[in-house]
Amino acid sequence: MGKNKPAKETTFTMNEVETQRAKDFCNRHRHHTVHMTAGEAFEFTFMPSMIGDVVSVRCLSCGEREDVTDLDKF
């Protein structure tokens, strides 16, 4: 049998608008995550599409999710 190939790495980026929206969301949920590190507190999801990437952030403490996609980039 052939060797398993390593998974291809993909890098996603957020523009300034998406970054600010994500920061605002995280700041609003900071009280939920006082004793957590950023990696334990929030989940970022990137969904590639034909015209661009959809970006959302979720608070892992309360479960709320917000779409922070900058639709003007499409």
Image (cartoon, rainbow, N blue to C red):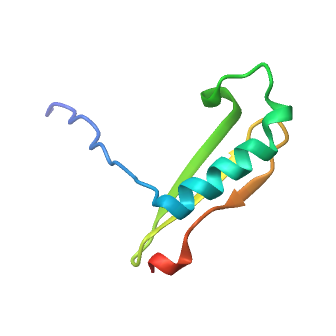
Name the one closer to the observer, 46 or 35. 35
Q: Which part of the image, by quadrant, shows the N terminus?
A: top left
Name the one closer to the observer, 56 or 48. 56
Q: Does residue 47 appear to the left or right of 31 in the view shown?
A: left
In the displayed orientation, state which residue is furthest to the top. 35
Residue 40, located in which quarter of the rendered image? top right
Q: Is 71 placed above or below 11 here?
A: below
Q: Is 66 placed above or below 73 here?
A: above
Residue 9, located in which quarter of the rendered image? top left
Name the one closer to the observer, 32 or 3. 32
In percent of width and height, residue 8 lies at 26, 44
Q: Which part of the image, by quadrant, shows the C terminus?
A: bottom left
In percent of width and height, residue 38 lies at 63, 30
Q: Does residue 23 appear to the left or right of 72 in the view shown?
A: right
Name the one closer to the observer, 56 or 9. 56
**Number of marks drawn:** 0
Q: Is 8 placed above or below 41 here?
A: below
In percent of width and height, residue 44 lies at 58, 47
In percent of width and height, residue 53 lies at 46, 66
Q: Does residue 59 appear to the left or right of 67 in the view shown?
A: right
**Residue at horizontal 80%, vertical 50%?**
64
**Residue at horizontal 41%, vertical 78%?**
51
In the displayed orientation, state which residue is furthest to the left. 2
**Residue at horizontal 79%, vertical 29%?**
33
